[in-house]
Image (spheres, grey):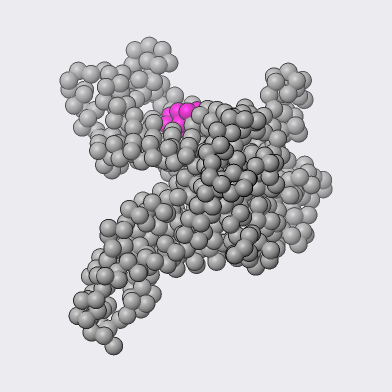
């Protein structure tokens, strides 16, 4: 058995070996698969180098898919972000009984994790063709949701309604600590200087919270942008969004160009990476003020 | 925590009033909280309504409770649940086996690699599940690594992908756990008593991380059980999420029953996390099963 001292003397040069299993696994399960897509996106049919695949992203239904994905993500990020913020504000600062805060936080934990197939089904049972609300409107007031109000859950607007179910609870979870971080002293200082409530929020609280709010909305954007299961279950794959289009390409080369499929995947990764990058920067900025 | 510290007439309520043009702030606090109550009510309604509708739908099958009876009688229900639980447990075991030594080592010996390790663990937030499985299928269905031809190979790919999905939660939980204990002193004490690295990890570090590991484990389980995207492309039809999806295409009331059960499982996992992490203040964040 080697002595402690001997081991200590030898260790520094081999210390990185300890994290090797982690990096090897990550390489096999993450690095190689993603690397394959990266390399493939720069290859033409014969295996030669090309950037044509990225230029071809503007052809066919690909722009539509990306536009729809971005639109849905934007709407649910802003809508879910605003409502999530209001809900967090209501339970933290709205003078509601204290236990409601923990109830809403736990609910949010569950709801932000309740996504995919069961969520899509739950909304079909609620407001789908035979759903509870659909049936109620028809039987009570004779309103046909699809014919009279032009709404169907199997559409873009429907998908947005469903996505909000996991979007706003996530906002609640992430923004709550930021609201907690608003210090009483700041409000009192503003008050002492004669600021009104509006002035306090406009010049003190919101500027401090702005990076958090904006950052979390961007995170929500990415959250919706990468979603696939919910949309697929809800629409049976008929809605034209980026993740569904990639799903079709996995099943079979529907674009008749594997490289184009890989380029599409790369396009998504670039957008996601930008979201996470900006989120990280904004989160760091907000930590300057909000230390909880 | 400054809960409820901003009380009317000052604070956000004043602003809400001016937004909603409710006139000048009055000393009465009830008006202010009325808006808070209203927001809460909308939130609760939106949250609860789909659940009520699902329950109502599942009970439309006559006689009463037939949908649930059918589900329980369906052998695929039990087998898919068992399959997903098994996959979940294997995922958790591998994830712990990889993350704990790594996080320990990063803290103790190679702090300069922290950024790199954290970056890799956060990749599932950048790489959507559908793209991860895209790459996995393309690379592991061709030579030299053919995995997708066999059941076992596909299961292995599924677990590998889920381990990647679990990294952000597991790493964060373990790292927070390690921050709470004095890793260096514990390690040196164990070393001076003659313990090797394996013994230190198993007998000293792991028991101290129980809380962190449990919360990471339940979160992973909650993600894995409902996961659909990766499983469906790897043709894992036994996975609970895929089973539910197929049921949704073929049956009327049974999917409602299974959806509720699935929601209940998420609920249970989250309650466990909340109970475990009560003191730890760890937060549940984005997941993979979108």
Q: Where does residue A158 sit, x and y in percent of width and height? A: 64, 30
Residue at image x 75%, y 29%? A135
Whether residue B100 appears in this view of the structure is: no
Instruction: Decide whether residue A218 is among the magenta residues.
Output: no
Q: Is residue B252 above or below residue A76?
A: below
Task: Give the number of marks.
Answer: 0
| Residue B265 x/y as whole percent | 59, 54
Compared to residue A96, the image places residue B112 above or below, namely below
**Which residue corresponds to the image point at 50% horizontal and 63% vertical from the top-left?**
B92
Q: Main secondary structure of the magenta part?
A: helix
Relative side of A143 to B27, left or right: right
Q: Report the front residue among A79 and B107.
A: B107
> Foreground: A249 or B206?
A249
Mark yes or no: residue B197 visible: yes
Give residue A283's quadrant in the image.
Answer: top left
Q: Position of residue A213 (x, y in %)?
A: 38, 32
Q: Which residues are magenta?
A: A78-87
Left or right side of B73 for B94 = left
Instruction: Give me the residue at 78% from left, 54% from top.
Output: B70
């Amino acid at each position: 058995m080697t002595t402690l001292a001997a081991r200590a003397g030898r260790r520094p040069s081999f210390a990185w070996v300890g994290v090797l299993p982690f990096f090897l696994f990550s390489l096999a399960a993450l690095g190689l698969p993603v690397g394959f897509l990266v390399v493939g996106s720069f290859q033409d049919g014969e295996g030669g180098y090309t950037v044509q695949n990225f230029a071809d992203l503007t052809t066919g239904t690909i722009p539509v898919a990306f536009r729809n994905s971005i639109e849905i993500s934007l709407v649910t990020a802003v809508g879910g972000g605003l409502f999530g913020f209001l809900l967090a504000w209501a339970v933290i600062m709205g003078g509601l009984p204290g236990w409601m805060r923990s109830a809403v936080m736990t609910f949010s934990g569950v709801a932000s994790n309740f996504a995919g197939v069961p969520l899509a089904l739950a909304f079909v049972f609620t407001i789908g063709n035979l759903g509870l609300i659909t049936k109620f409107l028809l039987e009570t007031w004779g309103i046909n949701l699809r014919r009279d109000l032009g709404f169907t859950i199997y559409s873009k607007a429907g998908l947005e309604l469903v996505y909000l179910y996991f979007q706003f609870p996530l906002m609640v979870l992430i923004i709550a600590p930021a609201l907690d971080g608003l210090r009483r002293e700041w409000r009192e200082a503003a008050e002492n200087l004669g600021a009104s409530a509006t002035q306090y929020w406009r010049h003190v609280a919101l500027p401090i919270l702005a990076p958090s709010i904006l950052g979390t909305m961007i995170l929500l954007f990415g959250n919706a942008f990468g979603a696939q299961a919910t949309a697929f279950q809800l629409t049976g794959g008929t809605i034209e969004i980026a993740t569904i289009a990639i799903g079709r390409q996995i099943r079979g080369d529907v674009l008749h160009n594997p490289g184009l499929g890989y380029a599409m995947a790369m396009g998504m990764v670039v957008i996601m990476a930008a979201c996470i990058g900006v989120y990280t920067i904004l989160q760091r900025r907000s930590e300057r003020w909000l230390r909880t | 925590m400054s809960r409820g510290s901003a009380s009317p007439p000052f604070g956000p309520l004043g602003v809400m009033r001016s937004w909603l043009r409710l006139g000048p702030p009055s000393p009465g606090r009830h008006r202010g909280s009325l808006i808070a109550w209203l927001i809460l009510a909308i939130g609760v309604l939106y949250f609860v309504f789909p659940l009520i509708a699902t329950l109502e739908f599942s009970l439309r099958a006559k006689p009463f409770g037939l949908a649930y009876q059918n589900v329980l009688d369906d052998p695929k229900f039990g087998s898919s649940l068992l399959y997903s639980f098994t996959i979940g447990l294997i995922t958790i075991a591998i994830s712990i086996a990889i993350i704990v030594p790594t996080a320990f080592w990063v803290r103790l010996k190679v702090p300069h690699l922290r950024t790199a390790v954290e970056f890799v663990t956060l990749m599932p937030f950048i790489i959507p599940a559908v793209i991860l499985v895209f790459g996995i299928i393309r690379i592991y269905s061709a030579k030299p690594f053919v995995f997708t031809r066999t059941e076992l190979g596909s299961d292995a790919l599924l677990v590998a992908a889920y381990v990647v999905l679990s990294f952000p939660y597991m790493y964060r939980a373990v790292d927070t756990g390690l921050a709470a204990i004095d890793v260096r002193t514990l390690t040196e004490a164990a070393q001076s008593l003659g313990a090797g690295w394996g013994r230190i990890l198993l007998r000293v570090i792991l028991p101290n991380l129980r809380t962190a590991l449990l919360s990471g484990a339940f979160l992973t389980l909650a993600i894995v059980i409902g996961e659909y995207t990766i499983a469906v492309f790897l043709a894992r039809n036994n996975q609970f999420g895929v089973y539910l999806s197929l049921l949704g295409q073929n049956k009327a009331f049974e999917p409602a029953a299974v959806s509720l059960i699935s929601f209940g499982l998420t609920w249970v996992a989250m309650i466990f996390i909340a109970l475990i992490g009560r003191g730890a203040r760890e937060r549940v964040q984005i997941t993979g099963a979108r």
